[in-house]
Image (cartoon, rainbow, N blue to C red):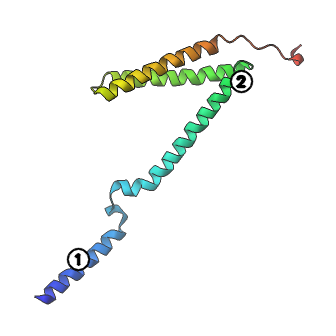
Amino acid sequence: MSLLRQLAEALDRLGRQHRRGLPFLTPAVERRRPRIAAEDYAARHSIEHTLDRKADLRRLAPHRRDAAERYRQLLSYELAGLREVVAALDSSAGGRDLQECLAEAREEIARLEVEVAWCAALPPPWPSAGAF
């Protein structure tokens, strides 16, 4: 009986060691953890870059027509995307958190519409001295 027990324990140990070394037996989230971290880093970097670029364009918009046009274009893309999200969420069932999220998104839409209007109303910049 002890020989059978020893054999069972030995097989159990071998099975555990073997399973631990096989990557396909680890849970899916653990396998994807490095890739998720890399995607998270890339997304954060992209968002920070976009926000920095947007701030630069807003600062330059009153002085350079190309910056104003690009800023308005970025705002229009953001506004269109936010409207699509609100439309999709409006049709879904949700609780209080969803309603708060929709209210915040609608406030952001209103803010973006004001910003687009400001950008469109900017007067053309004075021509530079070398233009004449």
Q: Return the x and y of residue 16 as percentages of the image width and height.
A: 28, 73
Residue 112 left/right relative to 129? left
Q: Residue at x 69, y 24 (%)?
A: 59
The disc, 1 or 2, on the residue closer to the chain's N-terminal end is: 1
**Amino acid tagged 1:** Asp
Write down the quadrant of residue 101 in the picture. Answer: top left
Q: Residue at x 23, y 79 (%)?
A: 11
The residue sitting at 65% across, 10% down in the picture is 121
Q: Nearer the viewer, residue 97 or 86?
A: 97
Q: Tell me the residue that label 2 is attached to.
A: 60
Query: Is 21 in front, or is 113?
Result: 113
Q: Is residue 106 above or below residue 30?
A: above
Asked whether, in this view, residue 112 is left or right of residue 56, the answer is left
Q: Nearer the viewer, mark 1 or mark 2?
A: 2
Using residue 87 as the reference point, say whether residue 48 is left or right of it. right
The residue that mark 1 highlights is: 12
Q: Secondary structure at mark 1?
A: helix
Q: Secondary structure at mark 2?
A: helix
Inspect the image, locate mark 2, and give the three-letter code of the amino acid beneath it. Answer: Leu
Residue 121's tag is: none
Quarter of the figure with the N terminus: bottom left
Rounded to the nearest angstrom, the CA distance separating label 1 from label 2 is: 69 Å
Residue 42: x and y in percent read 54, 45
Specify the quadrant that holds the C terminus: top right
Q: Residue at x 36, y 53 (%)?
A: 29
Residue 88's place in the image compared with 118, above or below, is below
Above or below residue 42? Residue 8 is below
Q: Are marks 1 and 2 in contact (CB under 8 Å)?
A: no
Note whether 3 is above or below 90 in the view shown: below
x, y percent for residue 96: 30, 26
